[in-house]
Amino acid sequence: MIPISRPLLGEEEVEEVKRVLLSGYLAHGPEVEAFEEEFSRFLGGRVCAAAVSSGTAALYLAYVATGLQRGKRLLTTPFTFMATASPAVQLGAEVLFADIDPETFCLSTEAVKEVLEREEIDLLVPVDLYGQATYLDDFEALSRKYGFRIVEDACQAHGALWKMRPAGTFGDVGVFSFYPTKNMTTGEGGMVVSSDEELLEEVRTLRNQGQRGRYEYAALGYNFRMTSIAAAIGRVQLKKLTTFNEMRRRRAEIYRELLDDVDGIVLPKEVKGAHHVYHQFTVRVKGGLRERLIEHLKQHGVGYGVYYPRLLYDYQPLKRFAPPGDLPEARRASLEVLSLPVHPGVSEHDVRKIAEIIKSFIRERG
Ligand SMILES: *Cc1c(COP(=O)(O)O)cnc(C)c1O
């Protein structure tokens, strides 16, 4: 079975974890600070970084630090992972949804503009879905015009670029996840990045029980700290990230060559100005054939993913935020998308094999 994702860890990570285990610093310590420093440098040094225990914790703290609370309103895409929205609801905020751009699967600038003409919002959360960051400068311009803040959910876009600017550095705050399926991992982990020193200081305080100094509780905080063990893994993974991403791009290119003119399969678009890092290689399967193609892939031992089969407001905890009249592009995407293995752990040979398996399915059907 070719898995849809698999973390790629080697001897180097093992050695570094061993070093940290023997150092005596297991929780927050110099290792975490070194990881933060290196991650900030990876993003070009324009933002500082605060490591936390998960991408979800990073989103939660980013929302608190940008003032989200009861009575405030967040606008985002319904075609994303639950953690983009759940912290906002837990904070008592109202969630609004705008439709996606069918080309990028990310929030549509036009749809956001339409919402802004009739609604006031406090926070916009664009998601760099599948590893592609697009049109984020347009959202920044809108935020200046309408006076809302932006948290960029870059949990799937480590190393992606939009107009030469790294994903995660747009808006007020950027958020990353290091879950094992992401482009780089720390086991569990996350990062909050921002050029706003004060805001990042608040994130650091909140992740550590609200402490400014030892036993100086400035706020009621949380324990959202990253462990030194996780940071040690992250430092090695960060060094490999660019190579990993190039491998993902190479695999995407092979799919493109082999599936380019296959009827009923629409390939993902890399928008001009974007450097896509293919967290997922996600095609559209037209003609209502997705479930049958999935059966065919299963029979041939090919792993796949459907990200995401339903929209966030389809789920009971978010039903009350459903927009009147549904969002047609997001709905269509949820019914058509299919992600194929594109991670560095799948060989180029296997990618070719998967492409052939898809071609043979289309041939048999026709
Ligand atoms: C993975 C992910 C998260 C959550 O990250 P965790 O580390 O799993 O908590 C949030 N948003 C998006 C878009 C993600 O892909």
Image: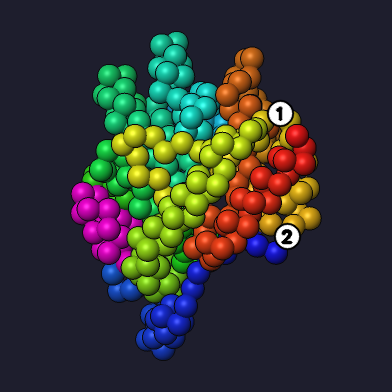
Residue 346 position by quadrant: bottom right
> Is disc 2 in contact with disc 1, using a CB cutoff of under 8 Å?
no
The amino acid type of the residue labelled 2 equals Gly
Residue 282 position by quadrant: top right
Residue 81 x/y as whole percent: 57, 43
Q: Residue at x 58, y 56 (%)?
A: 352
For the N terminus, give its image quadrant. bottom right
Q: Which range of residues does the magenta coloring cover? A: 35-55
Q: Residue at x 30, y 60 (%)?
A: 39
Along the line of sight, which residue is nearer the eye, 81 or 245? 245
The verdict on label 2 being within 8 Å of ligand 1 is no
Mark 1 packing: few (<14 Cα in 10 Å), some, or many (20+)?
A: few
Residue 359 x/y as whole percent: 66, 45
Q: Residue at x 35, y 39 (%)?
A: 274
The amino acid type of the residue labelled 1 equals Gly
Q: Within the magenta stretch, is there residue 149?
A: no
Write down the residue under mark 2. 301
Task: Using the rendered image of the protein, determine whether residue 173 is visible from the camera's viewpoint.
Answer: no
- Work out which residue is located at the far bottom of the displayed protein and give it: 22
Q: Within the magenta stretch, is there residue 39?
A: yes
Write down the residue under mark 1. 287
From the viewer's perspective, tell me whether residue 111 is left or right of residue 35: right
